[in-house]
Image (tube, grey):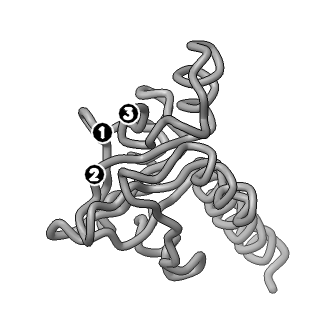
Amino acid sequence: MKTVSSILKTKGSEVSSVSPDVMVRDALKIMAEKNIGAIVVMDQAKLVGIFSERDYARKIVLKDKSSKTTPISEIMTSEDLITVKPSTRIEDCMVLMTDKRIRHLPVVEQDKLLGVISIGDLVKHIIEDQKATIENLQNYITGQ
């Protein structure tokens, strides 16, 4: 099974981020512009959290807070922040995301953020891998 690094090679390592003092609404605007479901929170070059659409729904909307006046630092996921390494197997990421019920994983090595992968990235990669396997098996069976 392939690793996270193979996804980053295909996807690239561009990461959208905000600082902890950014207001939730401003982070949501960036997420909408980039068409992403989560954004990492960086304090200078250090990963300090992640903010997702789920965080917004559960910690702003359901608690009647204002996205205009609430800083990301108040509602981001920072405790027990789950990250993976480039060497982590894709299969292990799928298990981790399923068990923890998360959709985004920051990729970190030696305290440096290298990228973010989503459940969609994993599914796309697995489907492409399965297509290649099927094609190889069909070629083998037909003697091509």
Please identify the quarter of the rendering in which residue 134 is found. bottom right
Question: What secondary structure is found at the residue carrying circle 3?
Answer: helix
- Helix, strand or loop at mark 1: loop
Q: Residue furthest front?
A: 69
Residue 11, given in percent of the width and then of the height, sits at 59, 76
Residue 35 location in percent, x, y? 74, 59
- Disc 1 residue crowd, few under 14, some 14–19, many 20+, Cα 10 Å: some
Tags 3 and 1 touching, CB below 8 Å: no
Q: Residue at x 74, y 64 (%)?
A: 33
Q: Quadrant of residue 29?
A: bottom right
In the image, residue 55 sits, relative to residue 143, either above or below, namely above
Badges 3 and 2: C-beta atoms under 8 Å apart? Answer: no
Q: Which residue is mark 3?
A: 74
- SS for dot 2: strand
Q: Nearer the viewer, mark 3 or mark 2?
A: 3
- Left or right placement of residue 27 versus residue 2 in this view: right
The answer to whether residue 141 is left or right of residue 7 is right
| Residue at 52% from the left image edge and 77% from the top image edge | 14
Residue found at the far right of this picture: 142
The residues bearing labels 3 and 1 have C-alpha atoms spaced at a distance of 10 Å
Q: Are marks 1 and 2 in contact (CB under 8 Å)?
A: yes
Instruction: Report which residue position mark 1 lands on.
Output: 78
The residue at which mark 2 appears reads as: 48
